[in-house]
Amino acid sequence: MPTAKKISAAYKLAQDAYAAVGVDTEKAIKRALALPISLHCWQTDDVAGLEPPREGLDGGGIMATGGYPGRARNGDEMRSDLSKVLSLLPGKQRLNLHAFYAETDGKPVDRDALQPEHFSNWVSWARRERIGLDFNPTYFAHPLANAGFTLAHADPSVRQFWIEHGKVSRRIAQHFAEKLRTPCVNNHWVPDGAKDAPADRFAPRHRLAESYDAIFADESVDTAKCIDAVEGKLFGLGSEEYVVGSQEFYSNYALTRQKMLCLDLGHYHPTESVADKVSAHLEFHPKLLVHTSRPVRWDSDHVVTLDDAVRNFFLEIARGNAWNRITIALDFFDASINRIAAYVIGTRATRQAMLCGLLDPTAQLQAAENEGRGHERLALMEYTRALPWGAVWDELCRRDDVPAGADWLKEVARYEKAVLSKRD
């Protein structure tokens, strides 16, 4: 494992190598540490939520597979696990909560009646950790979602229940922003869709747009504090043929209603380049929310790794200098491996991709392209793939006083033995 002395020596060599192509590694490290990543709370408990048990539920297209021991069973265990995760990560973090992680002291409180006080433990924890909170209304894992439709449901009473849930989620998000003094992104995703070909694709989309309009009509919510986002999807479990909230639907909705569009890297056809969508959307949308995830043959929400899709996505942001127009969050869940390790692997991979983008010699590449030296552009692109970005990453970790290399695995093993192994 790398020592501080070895890290510094390797970094000096890497710094010189990057300087030769016009890249300032000091600036890259500083910016990579400052950009926030919003961790998702649901990796701790396999997307189970903290609501009292309900019978006859359909997961609504959400499924964590595997049975690795140590799953968090309550809010205190979740927060303990998340604190351990934060201690192993470099850079600035946030936490992304779903509504069904409300803590109601065992009292039944349905989702249309949730209040900010049901998240007071989360706010207190976030204040201690000095991080901000983001939020998501939970439009799944509920009896009124079993039909596969929520905000687009044909029954007006069902739609109204979910509209009220969307409204209270915005007030909760505003509360988070006020208490923690940082805006809260409130991301809306619904599982609405059909397993087989519907006879009418128009009406559900009309109802979905009307439902969102009703949710966002509440002018008592300060949109500078609660930043609403909408998230599309190609298909899901139970919606293989038809998704009401498709990418095209949400792109148009967000643009016409001044909402943030969410791009989830797992919500597209496997051969699509999500990186290519960045410049297309940012030509028209002020900002984008991105969920880093990893699909394997389908939207399976695998733990993020530093694969081409993630690396290319953040490279595109860097080449457009669009960091101030992107909000970064995570969305994956794997119950087959140690959940603390899953967080660290996925979050580090995301920040590594950000760092690699910041280390790109964009100015030189674009100059060569603009001056007609395509061969030079391509040669430099290939050459920079071999530059020692890993040495810069280890230096980044050292400066933020977190384990470099794979040293963090030792602490995960200690935590598993002392804490996770004692859970039923």
Image (cartoon, rainbow, N blue to C red):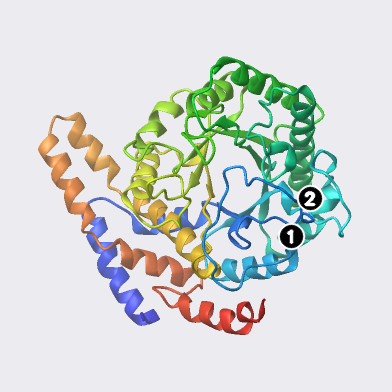
Split into 4 quadrants, where in the image is the C terminus?
bottom right
Q: Which mark is residue 179?
A: 2
Q: Position of residue 77 (x, y in %)?
A: 70, 69
Asked which secondary structure carries label 1, the reply is helix
Specify whether 62 is left or right of 161: left
Split into 4 quadrants, where in the image is the N terminus?
bottom left
Residue 181 seen by the camera: no
Q: Find residue 245 and report its image quarter.
A: top right
Q: Find residue 201 and report its image quarter.
A: top right
Above or below for 415 versus 54: below
User: Residue at point 34% right, 39% down?
Assistant: 319
Q: Find residue 20 and report its image quarter.
A: bottom left
Distance from disc 1 to disc 2, alpha carbons, whole Å, reads 9 Å
Amino acid at the residue labelled 2: Lys
Which residue occupies the foreground of this view, 170 or 33? Answer: 170
Q: Position of residue 244 (x, y in %)?
A: 56, 26
Q: Position of residue 358 (x, y in %)?
A: 37, 50
Q: Position of residue 322 (x, y in %)?
A: 44, 37
Counting residues from the N terminus, which is met first, the one under dot 1 or under dot 2? 1
Which residue occupies the foreground of this view, 120 or 159? Answer: 159
Query: Does the CB distance between marks 1 and 2 fall below 8 Å?
Result: yes
User: Residue at point 29% right, 63% down?
Assistant: 15
Q: On the image, numbered disc 1 is attached to which residue?
A: 127
Q: Label 1: how many residues lie within 10 Å, few (<14), some (14-19) or many (20+)?
A: some
Specify whether 375 is left or right of 349: left
User: Residue at point 79% right, 50% down?
Assistant: 179
Above or below for 297 versus 338: above
User: Residue at point 13% right, 41% down?
Assistant: 376
Q: Which mark is residue 169?
A: none
Specify whether 296 is left or right of 101: left
Amino acid at the residue labelled 1: Arg
